């Protein structure tokens, strides 16, 4: 018992000791955690202070640069960030330097740094770059800042940077650089810092640099091509054309360097990368020049390059379309092992026939492969397989080589030439076929990235199960020759899975190979569609399914481009239409919806094609010339790039689908926009874009055929018919002008028919419109058209304010005393009565006049800067303002709202020009105006300078106060913040008097600009759900008892400005019972929203007979509208019949009531619908 008691006591003591130890441990642990937390908090506080100090120092440096830049323009700037601060470079040039010659002179360089390191010395080690080449050159002594010294090597100068006031940064200035200097190179030297910190160059490697003069590309690249891309072009051409030794390996290594050092997020730099790689792929560039490259070196360089491209693909969503194009031109490459295997496996093949010694084809090829393997070897291997499978088929061998561009001359020109032809040994035939098939797979895996089987095998192991099943499904659908739409959906679904995995947690190597598989799938689908072998029954259900799959697939290739969302909306809308067909069958309405969706798709394709041309056209021509490429290759480069892109498949399928959809929609090949029923005879002219014919002189009765119409073109006088290949709204400005100028405007929406009539180029033809049918008959063929017609079948188609506010004069509401008797017979300016009689002056008599901008009619001279509707008169405002005055005076129904409006009257611009502050501008304006009046017909070269004169006008105090009053009237809450934008918008409207098309239209009528007054109608923008335009007499049929109207989603600028696609068009017979008949469903890809306030052109020539003024002048919002993509599958006017009918009926009632209020004259009305309310924003006589 005692023993047990003793042991129990010991156990208790032990337990107490353990408890104390545990408590001590816990206490120490808690204390340690507190200590760590405190240290972390102190570090975070210190880091925060350091960040704030770093930002404060940077702000001080930027302030120094900004202060030094006053009175100068910034030519170029560069910013580099280091752990201890920033280094900033800026080149400035005097504002007075305007000409290209002046801008080519070197400017002043400002350098500032926030790296202080406790006051240590910071020395700028700098030199000059002369021209586009070379490196460091020391600047002449006269350019050195005080205290500078020249380095012994003669290549650089060192200058200590001096503290700025406040000690937050250091800076220096370099002036007077010699002519021919293109840039300043720099590194920072910190002699008192730790050794690893003493030299700071560009983060990531290289020298810091700033451009000091505008350099024009010696390659003739267009001005819109970025400076980054232009500089890249010079470097690339220098290496490709001037280096003695150069191979594919060097090309890919330099490509990798540019990807990380230069391209950034520059669209044109990536276009440059693609064009360069494409010219390499086309064999325009040497694959090997005076340098032997081992296969393992080439495959490693290749793989590094495409891996870097894949990294950038994941980082740069908006540039994915260009990066994938560049990747498609480069093989995947491989590890050093892959490259070495090329050398090793050819030796195995050689051992099968001892006679293949020196001088044999196989030995020649072996020597080439050892030293310079390239993509030609894939073709050679394929040709050898043709030879062996054909029991020594030497002609088949030759044909395969020649058909793929590997000629005997090319093979003989290799560094290790291949001159002999293969010999056949029958007893090793099967062995050779097996060996060459295996060797071909190895070559393709290195040199080609788009082989589908190789690409799939490479990623199969880490593909997620669902995507793997989808790709297997594509293989099954293709190999079993399933219907085309099934194959397209299998491929699109597979690619969706790949894109999803690409965005997930894969490493760079996996991302590269997944992207190559995606490119391979896309290429395989294109081959299927182009071959025409896949079964396709042409039914509407199959057609819509194929279009949906292709639109979805193309959206995957577009990355973050807005077209990607638009294409997904096409898929969604066609899905809704397909469901409707499944429930109710084919119908006219379904056909119209299909046609609208296809029109939308065509317009999306047009924007993609325009992007290709904008990005690549100048670059491909500049590089092509520098590379001495054949003219034919250069001329069709962009066209072939488009044909090889994912967009081409959708283009082909739209053409296949067009006949069936137009049949259901009851649409012929032609859509009449502006009817003209006279027979004409004259030559046929063809253009890619209608704007190309502006200012041209053509014979009477000519037919102009253009692929694209932008909506604001001015067509040459005396034209009979204009045929366009793109849709245009019936009520767009170009259509209004066509009706006013009495020529036919017709859209040809059938690609086969368009090809047929374009083949008539140069021929003399009779043309006539009968109903919806356009007939064109050749009177006399041109030689060119005869040849074109022969080839036509072969063509592949394809606080309010701190300042004074002066309210507008007059009452806001027009007086009831303004009855019909008091109002002008026609709501337009005084110019109508003066020249609308038809007795227009000839141009010679106009030239004898000496109109002056100084002469201002008395009523305009004494008028307020801004007036309300009650003060509107024909001398002061145009027809837009006058008609709104009339609507207000005669009080249309309460359910039709009119936004608050005030007008800056006629003569205001002349008064501003006469202000003393604008004396110099007035003098220049007068000189330019005289030049304009004496110019040749069609000359518009002076228009930009005249517009610039107006945009440079200074704002008089009185007008500034009046503009504040205008903004106050319109309900603006931030008048001071909006004043600059308002003044800019007003000037923009005035400047549009000198739009090129406005000048050409005046010249056509024989008017000078002094005879055209310009008021500015100021309104608050109704941020509309829908906008509409009404013509109260059907402009197509001429029926006075029928209204024609068009509706778009959002603001009306997409309608009157003819944004791509169609509006919803409908007609309504006037009467008690209104029954709208739909003529077209909407197909515009985007809507416009926002704008706040709009300043509309209101000239007295807007509705002048014989003068197509509609749309010649600009209306400008104070804030730029923003685009919103439209998903018609969820849009009420498309899917809700009751809502659509109510909207159309309301629009028709507005048309009838406004026409009645205006004395029965036909009206052209613009309005909108917002939150259940209708608005009329302007009305004028219908021309």
Image (tube, helix red, strand yellow):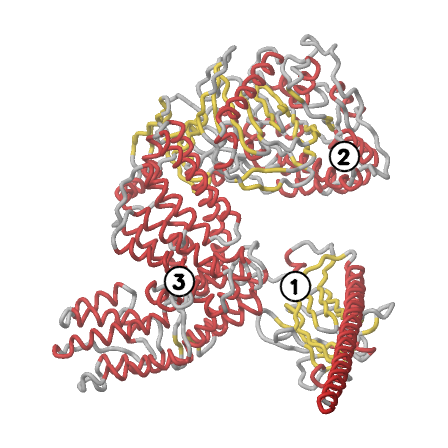
N-term-proximal mark, 2 vs 1: 1
- Taking depth in this image into account, of 1151 and 884 the one nearest to the observer is 1151
Q: Quadrant of residue 884?
A: top right
- Taking depth in this image into account, of 301 and 706 the one nearest to the observer is 301
In three-dimensional space, the C-alpha distance between marks 2 and 1, rounded to whole angstroms, equals 44 Å
Instruction: Give the label on residue 861, or none.
Output: none
Disc 1 packing (10 Å; few <14; some 14–19; many ≥20): many
Instruction: Give the residue displayed 43% in from the left and 59% down from the top.
Output: 498
In three-dimensional space, the C-alpha distance between marks 3 and 2, rounded to whole angstroms, equals 55 Å
Disc 2 packing (10 Å; few <14; some 14–19; many ≥20): many
Residue where numbered disc 3 is placed: 517
Which residue reaches farthest top? Answer: 821
Q: Locate the C terminus by quadrant.
A: top right
- Taking depth in this image into account, of 907 and 229 the one nearest to the observer is 229
Residue 479 in sight in this render: yes
Q: Dot 1: what SS?
A: loop
Q: Is residue 457 left or right of residue 235?
A: left
In three-dimensional space, the C-alpha distance between marks 1 and 3, rounded to whole angstroms, equals 45 Å
Residue 872 x %, y %? 73, 20
Instruction: Give the residue displayed 78% in from the left and 20% down from the top.
Output: 811
Pointer 3 and pointer 2: residues touching (CB < 8 Å)?
no
Q: Quadrant of residue 904?
A: top right
Q: Dot 3: what SS?
A: helix
Q: Quadrant of residue 701?
A: top left
Q: Is residue 269 left or right of residue 449?
A: right
Residue 217 x %, y %? 55, 62
- Tell me: residue 757, above or below residue 343: above
Q: Is residue 1117 left or right of residue 423?
A: right
Instruction: Give the residue displayed 72% in from the left and 57% down from the top.
Output: 73
Residue 699 in sight in this render: no
Residue where numbered disc 2 is placed: 972
Residue where numbered disc 1 is placed: 213
């Amino acid at each position: 018992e005692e023993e047990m008691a003793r042991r129990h006591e010991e156990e208790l003591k032990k337990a107490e000791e353990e408890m104390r130890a545990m408590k001590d441990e816990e206490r120490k642990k808690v204390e340690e955690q507190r200590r760590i937390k405190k240290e972390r908090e102190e570090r975070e506080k210190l880091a925060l202070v350091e960040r704030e100090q770093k930002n404060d120092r940077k702000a001080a440096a930027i302030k120094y640069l900004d202060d030094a830049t006053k009175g100068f323009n910034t030519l170029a700037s560069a910013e580099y960030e280091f752990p201890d601060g920033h280094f900033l470079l800026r080149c400035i040039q005097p504002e007075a330097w305007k000409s290209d010659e002046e801008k080519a002179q070197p400017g002043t360089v400002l350098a500032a740094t926030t790296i202080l390191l406790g006051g240590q010395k910071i020395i700028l080690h700098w030199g000059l770059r002369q021209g586009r080449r070379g490196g460091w050159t020391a600047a002449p002594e006269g350019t050195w800042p005080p205290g500078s010294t020249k380095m012994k090597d003669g290549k650089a100068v060192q200058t200590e940077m001096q503290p700025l006031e406040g000690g937050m940064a250091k800076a220096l200035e370099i002036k007077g650089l010699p002519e021919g200097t293109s840039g300043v190179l720099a590194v920072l030297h910190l002699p008192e810092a730790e050794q690893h910190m003493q030299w700071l160059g560009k983060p990531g490697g290289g020298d810091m640099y700033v451009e000091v003069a505008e350099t024009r590309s010696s390659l003739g690249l267009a001005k819109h091509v970025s400076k980054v891309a232009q500089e890249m072009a010079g470097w690339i051409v220098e290496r490709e054309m001037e280096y003695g030794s150069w191979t594919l390996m060097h090309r890919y290594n330099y490509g990798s360097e540019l990807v990380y050092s230069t391209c950034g997020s520059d669209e044109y730099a990536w276009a440059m990368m693609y064009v360069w790689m494409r010219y390499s792929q086309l064999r325009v560039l040497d694959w090997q020049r005076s340098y032997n490259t081992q296969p393992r070196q080439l495959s490693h360089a290749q793989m590094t390059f495409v891996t870097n491209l894949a990294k950038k693909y994941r980082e740069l969503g908006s540039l994915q379309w260009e990066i994938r194009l560049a990747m498609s031109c480069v093989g995947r490459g491989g590890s050093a092992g892959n490259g070495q295997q090329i050398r090793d496996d050819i030796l195995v093949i050689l051992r099968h026939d001892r006679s293949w010694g020196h001088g044999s084809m196989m030995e020649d090829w072996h020597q080439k492969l050892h030293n310079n393997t390239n993509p030609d070897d894939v073709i050679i291997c394929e040709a050898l397989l043709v030879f062996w499978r054909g029991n020594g088929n030497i002609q088949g061998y030759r044909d395969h080589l020649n058909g793929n561009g590997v000629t005997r001359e090319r093979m003989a020109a290799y560094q290790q030439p291949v001159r002999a032809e293969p010999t056949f040994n029958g007893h090793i035939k099967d062995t050779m076929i097996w060996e060459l098939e295996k060797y071909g797979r190895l070559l393709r895996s290195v040199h080609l990235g788009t082989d589908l089987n190789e690409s799939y095998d490479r990623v199969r192991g880490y593909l997620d199960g669902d995507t793997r099943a989808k790709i297997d499904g594509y293989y099954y659908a293709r190999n079993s020759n399933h219907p085309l739409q099934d194959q397209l959906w299998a491929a699109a679904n597979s690619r969706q899975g790949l894109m999803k995995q690409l965005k997930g947690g894969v490493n760079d190597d996996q991302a590269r190979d997944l992207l190559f598989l995606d490119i391979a799938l896309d290429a395989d689908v294109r081959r299927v569609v182009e071959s025409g072998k896949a079964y396709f029954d042409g039914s509407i259900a199959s057609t819509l399914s194929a279009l949906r799959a292709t639109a979805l697939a193309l959206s995957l290739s577009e990355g973050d481009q807005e077209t990607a969302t638009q294409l997904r909306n096409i898929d969604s809308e066609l899905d809704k239409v397909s469901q409707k067909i499944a429930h109710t069958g084919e119908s006219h309405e379904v056909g119209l919806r299909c046609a609208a969706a296809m029109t939308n798709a065509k317009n999306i394709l047009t924007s993609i094609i325009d992007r290709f041309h904008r990005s690549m056209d100048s670059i491909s021509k500049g590089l092509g010339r520098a590379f001495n490429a054949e003219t034919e290759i250069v001329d069709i480069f962009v066209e072939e790039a488009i044909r090889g892109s994912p967009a081409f498949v959708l283009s082909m399928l739209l053409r296949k689908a067009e006949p069936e959809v137009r049949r259901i929609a009851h649409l012929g090949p032609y859509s009449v926009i502006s009817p003209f029923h006279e027979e004409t005879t004259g030559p046929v002219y063809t253009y890619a874009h209608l704007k190309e014919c502006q200012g041209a002189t053509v014979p009477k009765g000519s037919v102009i055929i253009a692929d694209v119409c932008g909506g604001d073109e001015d067509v040459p006088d005396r034209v009979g018919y204009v045929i366009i290949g793109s849709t245009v709204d019936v009520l767009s400005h170009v259509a209004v002008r066509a009706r006013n100028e009495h020529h036919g405007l017709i859209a040809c929406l059938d690609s086969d028919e368009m090809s047929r009539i374009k083949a008539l180029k140069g021929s003399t033809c009779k043309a006539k419109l009968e109903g919806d049918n356009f007939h064109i008959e050749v009177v006399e063929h041109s030689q060119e058209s005869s040849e074109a017609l022969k080839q036509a079948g072969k063509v592949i188609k394809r606080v309010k304010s701190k300042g004074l506010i002066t309210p507008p004069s007059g009452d806001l509401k027009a007086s009831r005393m303004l009855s019909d008797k008091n109002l002008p017979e026609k709501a337009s300016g005084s110019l109508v009565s003066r020249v609308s009689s038809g007795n227009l002056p000839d141009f010679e008599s106009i030239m004898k006049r000496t109109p002056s901008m100084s002469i201002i009619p008395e009523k305009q001279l004494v008028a307020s800067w801004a007036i309300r509707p009650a003060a509107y008169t024909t001398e002061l405002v145009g027809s837009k303002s006058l008609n709104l005055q009339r609507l207000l005076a005669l009080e249309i129904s309460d359910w039709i709202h009119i936004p608050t409006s005030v007008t800056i009257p006629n003569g205001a611009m002349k008064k501003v020009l006469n202000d003393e502050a604008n004396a110099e501008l007035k003098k220049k304006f007068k000189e330019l105006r005289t030049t304009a009046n004496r110019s040749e017909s069609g000359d518009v070269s002076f228009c930009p300078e005249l517009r610039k004169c107006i945009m440079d006008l200074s704002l008089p105090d009185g007008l500034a106060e009046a503009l504040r009053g205008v903004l106050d009237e319109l309900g603006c809450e931030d008048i001071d913040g909006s004043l600059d934008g308002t003044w800019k918008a007003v000037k923009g409207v005035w400047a549009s008097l000198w739009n090129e098309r406005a000048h050409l239209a005046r010249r056509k009528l024989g008017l000078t600009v002094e005879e055209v007054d310009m008021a500015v109608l100021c309104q608050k923008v109704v941020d509309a759900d829908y906008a509409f335009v009404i013509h109260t007499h059907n402009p197509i049929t001429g029926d006075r008892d029928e209204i024609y109207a068009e509706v778009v989603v959002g603001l009306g600028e997409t309608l009157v400005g003819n944004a791509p696609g169609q509006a919803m068009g409908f007609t309504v017979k006037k009467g008690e019972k209104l029954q709208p008949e739909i003529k077209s469903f909407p197909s515009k890809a985007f809507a416009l929203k926002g704008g706040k306030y709009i300043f509309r052109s209101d000239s007295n020539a807007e509705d002048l007979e014989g003068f197509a003024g509609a749309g010649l002048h600009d209306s400008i919002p104070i804030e730029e509208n923003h685009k919103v993509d439209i998903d018609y599958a969820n849009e009420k006017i498309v899917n809700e019949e009751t809502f659509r009918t109510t909207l159309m009926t309301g629009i028709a009632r507005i048309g009838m009531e406004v026409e009645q209020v205006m004395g029965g004259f036909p009206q052209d009305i613009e309005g909108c619908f917002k939150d259940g309310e209708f608005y009329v924003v302007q009305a004028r006589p219908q021309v």
